Image (cartoon, rainbow, N blue to C red):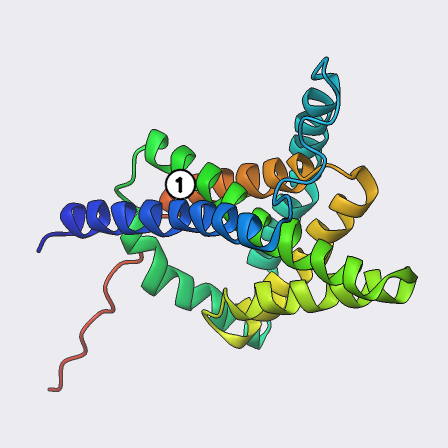
């Protein structure tokens, strides 16, 4: 199977997986009688959701700055993570089109935020109540988010940190659209950035005299 075909199949698999998370979140929310989209559609005029989208775009910027910073830090675990991404992920997304990246990013933003923030974090916070309960809910939801993004231990730790950030966005704005949009915008720009990473030349073969 050639590289474009592998990339196409991976795009289909990614879309099915992330779209499946949306369905899972909706079904789970129905069974648990919880809204997996807290804060969305809270006002009839729709201005709160439009403002949430704008804040979500702005909230993606610190994460993107973090991505660029990590790429420029040369020490051990981060260097190893960069090589893993270059070797395992980049070849699979290099042939994705912009619409494919946008669709998968949007599905990931909704599916993952509905599950980890909309259901898990808010559910745990309601169960425990109080400030300590909210803090514990954010930490546990973020830990689960990190574990589910286990590519390497370093990547899982970074994903958990991003989960804390997204969880705080939900608390601050009380509208899931903010972390959803921040997540989707970050994924979209990160995918474009990674897909355009120059291919590393094959290692030169050494010959013995």
Q: Residue at x 64, y 69 (%)?
A: 143
Instruction: Give the crowd class for mark 1: few <14, some 14-19, many >=20 residues within 10 Å.
Output: many
Residue for badge 1: 104
Note whether 88 is above or below 102 in the view shown. Answer: below
Residue 26 visible in the picture: yes
Provide residue 22's location: percent of width, then percent of height. Answer: 46, 45
Side of 205 where 84 appears, left or right: right
| Up/down of 149 relative to 172, above or below | below
Most distant residue in the top direction: 45
Residue 151 found in image quarter = bottom left
Vertical order, 70 against 38 (above or below): below
Q: Which residue is more in the foreground, 5 or 139? A: 139
Local secondary structure at mark 1 = helix
The residue lying furthest to the bottom in this view is: 209
Q: Is residue 52 left or right of residue 154?
A: right
Image location of residue 4, percent across then percent down: 17, 45
Drawn side of residue 98 relative to residue 107, left or right? left
């Amino acid at each position: 199977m050639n590289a474009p075909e592998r990339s196409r199949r991976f795009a289909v698999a990614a879309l099915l997986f992330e779209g499946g998370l949306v369905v899972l979140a909706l079904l789970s929310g129905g069974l648990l009688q919880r809204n997996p989209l807290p804060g969305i559609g809270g006002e009839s005029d729709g201005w709160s959701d439009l403002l949430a989208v704008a804040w979500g775009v702005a909230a993606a910027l610190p994460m993107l700055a973090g991505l660029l910073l990590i790429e420029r830090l040369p020490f051990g675990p981060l260097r190893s993570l960069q090589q893993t991404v270059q070797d395992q992920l980049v070849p699979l997304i290099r042939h994705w089109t912009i619409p494919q990246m946008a669709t998968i990013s949007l599905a990931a933003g909704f599916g993952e935020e509905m599950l980890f923030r909309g259901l898990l974090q808010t559910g745990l916070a309601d169960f425990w109540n109080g400030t300590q309960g909210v803090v514990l809910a954010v930490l546990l939801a973020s830990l689960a988010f990190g574990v589910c993004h286990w590519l390497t231990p370093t990547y899982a730790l970074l994903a958990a940190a991003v989960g804390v950030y997204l969880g705080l966005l939900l608390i601050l704005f009380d509208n899931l659209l903010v972390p959803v949009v921040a997540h989707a915008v970050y994924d979209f720009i990160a995918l474009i950035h990674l897909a355009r990473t120059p291919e590393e030349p094959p290692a030169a073969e050494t010959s013995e005299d």
